[in-house]
Image (spheres, rainbow, N blue to C red):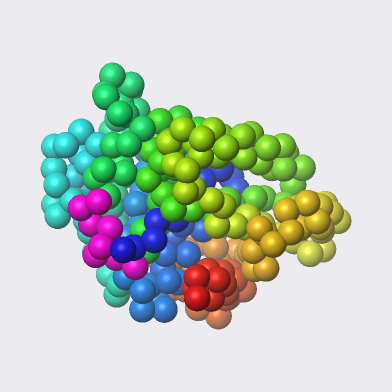
Protein backbone atom coordinates (compact mmCIF):
# COMPACT_ATOMS: atom_id res chain seq x y z
CA UNK A 1 0.00 0.00 0.00
CA UNK A 2 1.39 3.39 -1.01
CA UNK A 3 2.40 5.92 1.59
CA UNK A 4 0.55 9.24 1.48
CA UNK A 5 2.55 12.35 2.39
CA UNK A 6 0.75 15.69 2.52
CA UNK A 7 2.69 18.93 2.12
CA UNK A 8 0.90 21.75 3.89
CA UNK A 9 1.35 25.10 5.56
CA UNK A 10 -1.38 27.71 5.81
CA UNK A 11 1.22 30.40 5.14
CA UNK A 12 1.93 31.03 1.47
CA UNK A 13 5.35 31.54 -0.05
CA UNK A 14 7.15 28.85 1.94
CA UNK A 15 8.14 26.65 -1.07
CA UNK A 16 5.24 24.25 -0.56
CA UNK A 17 4.57 23.64 -4.26
CA UNK A 18 8.29 23.67 -5.06
CA UNK A 19 8.72 20.94 -2.46
CA UNK A 20 5.79 18.89 -3.75
CA UNK A 21 7.08 18.91 -7.33
CA UNK A 22 10.72 18.28 -6.56
CA UNK A 23 10.25 15.72 -3.80
CA UNK A 24 7.89 13.74 -6.04
CA UNK A 25 10.36 13.93 -8.94
CA UNK A 26 13.27 12.91 -6.71
CA UNK A 27 11.37 9.88 -5.43
CA UNK A 28 10.51 8.98 -9.04
CA UNK A 29 14.18 9.20 -10.02
CA UNK A 30 14.83 6.74 -7.18
CA UNK A 31 12.50 4.40 -9.13
CA UNK A 32 9.58 4.74 -6.75
CA UNK A 33 6.17 5.01 -8.41
CA UNK A 34 4.65 8.34 -7.40
CA UNK A 35 1.28 10.03 -7.80
CA UNK A 36 1.45 13.79 -7.26
CA UNK A 37 -1.94 15.28 -6.35
CA UNK A 38 -2.49 19.00 -6.94
CA UNK A 39 -5.06 20.10 -4.38
CA UNK A 40 -4.51 23.83 -4.83
CA UNK A 41 -7.00 25.69 -7.06
CA UNK A 42 -4.14 27.86 -8.30
CA UNK A 43 -2.82 24.75 -10.06
CA UNK A 44 0.83 25.73 -9.76
CA UNK A 45 1.92 22.13 -9.30
CA UNK A 46 0.14 21.29 -12.55
CA UNK A 47 1.68 24.10 -14.60
CA UNK A 48 5.05 23.59 -12.89
CA UNK A 49 5.18 20.19 -14.57
CA UNK A 50 4.41 21.66 -17.98
CA UNK A 51 0.71 20.69 -18.07
CA UNK A 52 -1.69 23.11 -19.76
CA UNK A 53 -4.61 23.58 -17.35
CA UNK A 54 -6.86 24.87 -20.14
CA UNK A 55 -6.70 21.59 -22.05
CA UNK A 56 -7.37 19.15 -19.22
CA UNK A 57 -10.04 16.54 -19.80
CA UNK A 58 -10.65 16.56 -16.06
CA UNK A 59 -9.12 17.56 -12.76
CA UNK A 60 -9.21 16.76 -9.07
CA UNK A 61 -12.47 18.74 -8.96
CA UNK A 62 -14.13 15.98 -11.00
CA UNK A 63 -12.87 13.46 -8.45
CA UNK A 64 -14.44 15.37 -5.55
CA UNK A 65 -17.76 15.68 -7.36
CA UNK A 66 -17.75 12.10 -8.67
CA UNK A 67 -17.99 13.17 -12.30
CA UNK A 68 -14.99 11.22 -13.56
CA UNK A 69 -13.04 8.21 -12.27
CA UNK A 70 -9.35 8.26 -11.42
CA UNK A 71 -8.48 6.40 -14.61
CA UNK A 72 -9.62 9.37 -16.72
CA UNK A 73 -7.92 12.01 -14.59
CA UNK A 74 -4.37 10.82 -14.05
CA UNK A 75 -1.74 12.28 -16.39
CA UNK A 76 1.74 10.94 -17.06
CA UNK A 77 4.18 13.78 -16.58
CA UNK A 78 6.79 12.56 -19.03
CA UNK A 79 9.09 11.66 -16.14
CA UNK A 80 9.22 7.90 -15.66
CA UNK A 81 7.41 6.72 -12.50
CA UNK A 82 5.70 10.10 -11.91
CA UNK A 83 1.97 10.63 -12.53
CA UNK A 84 -0.11 13.70 -11.78
CA UNK A 85 -3.68 14.31 -10.67
CA UNK A 86 -4.02 17.90 -11.94
CA UNK A 87 -5.91 20.88 -10.58
CA UNK A 88 -7.93 23.61 -12.29
CA UNK A 89 -9.36 26.87 -10.98
CA UNK A 90 -12.78 25.19 -10.79
CA UNK A 91 -11.48 23.44 -7.66
CA UNK A 92 -12.49 26.63 -5.84
CA UNK A 93 -16.07 25.46 -6.27
CA UNK A 94 -15.34 22.09 -4.68
CA UNK A 95 -14.75 23.67 -1.29
CA UNK A 96 -18.18 25.32 -1.48
CA UNK A 97 -19.85 22.08 -2.60
CA UNK A 98 -18.13 20.07 0.13
CA UNK A 99 -19.89 22.08 2.83
CA UNK A 100 -23.25 20.45 2.07
CA UNK A 101 -21.88 16.90 1.67
CA UNK A 102 -22.13 14.14 4.24
CA UNK A 103 -18.71 13.09 5.58
CA UNK A 104 -17.23 16.03 3.71
CA UNK A 105 -13.82 15.61 5.37
CA UNK A 106 -13.37 12.06 4.03
CA UNK A 107 -14.19 12.46 0.32
CA UNK A 108 -10.54 12.39 -0.76
CA UNK A 109 -9.69 9.54 1.60
CA UNK A 110 -12.45 7.38 0.14
CA UNK A 111 -11.40 8.21 -3.42
CA UNK A 112 -7.71 7.39 -2.87
CA UNK A 113 -8.55 3.82 -1.86
CA UNK A 114 -9.05 3.14 -5.57
CA UNK A 115 -5.42 3.87 -6.52
CA UNK A 116 -3.39 3.69 -3.33
CA UNK A 117 -2.08 0.20 -4.08
CA UNK A 118 -0.82 1.32 -7.51
CA UNK A 119 1.88 3.65 -6.15
CA UNK A 120 4.72 3.61 -3.67
CA UNK A 121 4.08 7.23 -2.72
CA UNK A 122 1.20 9.66 -3.09
CA UNK A 123 2.26 13.27 -2.54
CA UNK A 124 -0.47 15.87 -1.91
CA UNK A 125 0.14 19.58 -2.44
CA UNK A 126 -2.36 21.65 -0.43
CA UNK A 127 -3.60 25.24 -0.81
CA UNK A 128 -2.14 27.84 1.57
CA UNK A 129 -5.13 27.62 3.94
CA UNK A 130 -6.66 25.30 6.51
CA UNK A 131 -10.01 24.93 4.72
CA UNK A 132 -11.92 21.81 3.66
CA UNK A 133 -9.49 20.87 0.90
CA UNK A 134 -6.55 20.79 3.30
CA UNK A 135 -8.71 19.04 5.90
CA UNK A 136 -9.50 16.33 3.33
CA UNK A 137 -5.77 15.87 2.72
CA UNK A 138 -4.99 15.65 6.44
CA UNK A 139 -7.76 13.08 6.91
CA UNK A 140 -6.47 10.94 4.03
CA UNK A 141 -2.74 11.16 4.70
CA UNK A 142 -0.29 9.06 6.65
CA UNK A 143 2.00 11.96 7.45
CA UNK A 144 2.47 15.69 7.09
CA UNK A 145 5.56 17.39 5.72
CA UNK A 146 5.73 21.05 6.76
CA UNK A 147 7.88 23.42 4.66
CA UNK A 148 9.02 26.30 6.85
CA UNK A 149 10.65 29.44 5.48
CA UNK A 150 13.52 30.65 7.60
CA UNK A 151 11.86 33.81 8.86
CA UNK A 152 10.09 34.90 12.06
CA UNK A 153 6.48 34.94 10.85
CA UNK A 154 6.81 31.40 9.53
CA UNK A 155 7.39 30.19 13.09
CA UNK A 156 4.22 31.93 14.23
CA UNK A 157 2.18 30.12 11.58
CA UNK A 158 3.63 26.78 12.63
CA UNK A 159 1.89 27.01 16.00
CA UNK A 160 -1.52 27.31 14.30
CA UNK A 161 -0.79 24.35 12.03
CA UNK A 162 0.24 22.14 14.95
CA UNK A 163 -3.03 22.95 16.73
CA UNK A 164 -4.93 21.90 13.60
CA UNK A 165 -2.97 18.64 13.45
CA UNK A 166 -3.96 17.85 17.03
CA UNK A 167 -7.64 18.43 16.26
CA UNK A 168 -7.48 16.19 13.18
CA UNK A 169 -5.73 13.46 15.19
CA UNK A 170 -8.46 13.60 17.82
CA UNK A 171 -11.47 13.51 15.50
CA UNK A 172 -10.59 12.34 11.98
CA UNK A 173 -7.20 10.65 11.61
CA UNK A 174 -5.64 9.23 14.75
CA UNK A 175 -2.63 7.85 12.83
CA UNK A 176 -1.64 11.25 11.38
CA UNK A 177 1.92 12.18 12.30
CA UNK A 178 4.48 14.74 11.24
CA UNK A 179 6.84 13.38 8.59
CA UNK A 180 9.13 16.28 9.28
CA UNK A 181 9.65 20.03 9.24
CA UNK A 182 11.60 21.16 6.19
CA UNK A 183 13.56 24.40 6.43
CA UNK A 184 13.33 26.22 3.09
CA UNK A 185 14.77 29.36 1.46
CA UNK A 186 17.76 29.11 3.75
CA UNK A 187 20.54 31.63 3.25
CA UNK A 188 23.58 30.85 5.37
CA UNK A 189 24.85 34.42 4.95
CA UNK A 190 21.73 35.76 6.64
CA UNK A 191 21.75 36.00 10.43
CA UNK A 192 17.95 35.61 10.63
CA UNK A 193 18.04 32.39 8.59
CA UNK A 194 20.60 30.93 10.95
CA UNK A 195 18.71 32.13 14.02
CA UNK A 196 15.40 30.64 12.86
CA UNK A 197 17.09 27.38 11.85
CA UNK A 198 18.81 27.02 15.22
CA UNK A 199 15.64 27.84 17.14
CA UNK A 200 13.47 25.38 15.18
CA UNK A 201 16.05 22.61 15.48
CA UNK A 202 16.44 23.29 19.19
CA UNK A 203 12.69 23.19 19.81
CA UNK A 204 11.62 20.33 17.49
CA UNK A 205 14.79 18.22 17.48
CA UNK A 206 14.56 15.09 15.34
CA UNK A 207 11.31 16.27 13.73
CA UNK A 208 13.35 18.68 11.61
CA UNK A 209 14.86 17.19 8.46
CA UNK A 210 18.64 17.26 8.29
CA UNK A 211 18.27 18.47 4.71
CA UNK A 212 17.82 22.23 4.29
CA UNK A 213 16.55 23.76 1.04
CA UNK A 214 18.68 26.76 0.04
CA UNK A 215 17.69 29.92 -1.76
CA UNK A 216 18.53 28.94 -5.32
CA UNK A 217 17.69 30.67 -8.58
CA UNK A 218 17.20 27.41 -10.48
CA UNK A 219 14.38 26.42 -8.10
CA UNK A 220 12.58 29.61 -9.13
CA UNK A 221 13.34 29.19 -12.83
CA UNK A 222 12.44 25.52 -13.31
CA UNK A 223 8.61 25.89 -13.07
CA UNK A 224 8.59 28.44 -15.89
CA UNK A 225 10.10 25.70 -18.06
CA UNK A 226 7.53 23.16 -16.85
CA UNK A 227 10.16 20.94 -15.26
CA UNK A 228 11.27 19.72 -11.84
CA UNK A 229 14.60 21.28 -10.97
CA UNK A 230 16.51 18.02 -11.43
CA UNK A 231 15.34 17.95 -15.07
CA UNK A 232 16.25 21.62 -15.51
CA UNK A 233 19.60 21.77 -13.74
CA UNK A 234 20.60 18.50 -12.13
CA UNK A 235 23.84 19.90 -10.70
CA UNK A 236 22.26 22.90 -8.94
CA UNK A 237 22.24 23.16 -5.16
CA UNK A 238 18.43 23.09 -5.22
CA UNK A 239 18.37 19.83 -7.16
CA UNK A 240 20.92 18.22 -4.85
CA UNK A 241 18.94 19.34 -1.80
CA UNK A 242 15.68 17.72 -2.93
CA UNK A 243 17.48 14.51 -3.89
CA UNK A 244 18.94 14.51 -0.37
CA UNK A 245 15.45 15.05 1.09
CA UNK A 246 14.09 12.07 -0.87
CA UNK A 247 17.00 9.94 0.32
CA UNK A 248 16.32 11.03 3.91
CA UNK A 249 12.66 10.03 3.62
CA UNK A 250 13.54 6.71 2.02
CA UNK A 251 16.18 5.90 4.64
CA UNK A 252 13.85 6.95 7.45
CA UNK A 253 11.25 4.52 6.15
CA UNK A 254 13.81 1.72 6.10
All told, the count of numbered labels is 0
Percent coordinates x, y for residue 27 in the rendering: 42, 71
Residue 175 placement, left or right of 116: right
* Foreground of the two, 118 or 35: 118
Residue drawn at x 64%, y 68% is 211
Quadrant in the picture for the N terminus: bottom left
Residue 105, image x and y in percent?
A: 36, 32
Q: Is residue 94 visible?
A: yes
Residue at 49% over, 48% down: 176
Magenta residues, start to end: 113-120
Seen at 25% across and 51% down, the residue is 113
Q: Quadrant of residue 33?
A: bottom left
**Relative to 198, 88 lies left or right:** left
Q: Is residue 99 above or below residue 121?
A: above
Camera-side residue of 57 and 244: 244
* Quadrant of residue 217 within the rendered picture: bottom right
Asked if one can make out residue 54 in the rendered structure from this viewpoint, the answer is: no
What residue is drawn where x is 45% and y is 72%?
Answer: 26
186 left or right of 115 in image:
right
Q: Relative to residue 165, is residue 79 depicted above or below?
A: below
Q: Is residue 117 magenta?
A: yes
- Horizontal and vertical percent position of residue 49: 36, 60
Q: Is residue 80 magenta?
A: no
Amino acid sequence: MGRIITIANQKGGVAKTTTAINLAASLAVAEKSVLLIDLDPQGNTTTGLGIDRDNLRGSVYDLFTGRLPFSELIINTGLKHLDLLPAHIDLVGAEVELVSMNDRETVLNNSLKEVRDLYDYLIIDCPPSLGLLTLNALTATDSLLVPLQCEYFAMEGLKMLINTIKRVQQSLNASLHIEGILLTMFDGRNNLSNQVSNEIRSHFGALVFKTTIPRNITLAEAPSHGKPVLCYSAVSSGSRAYLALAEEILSGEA
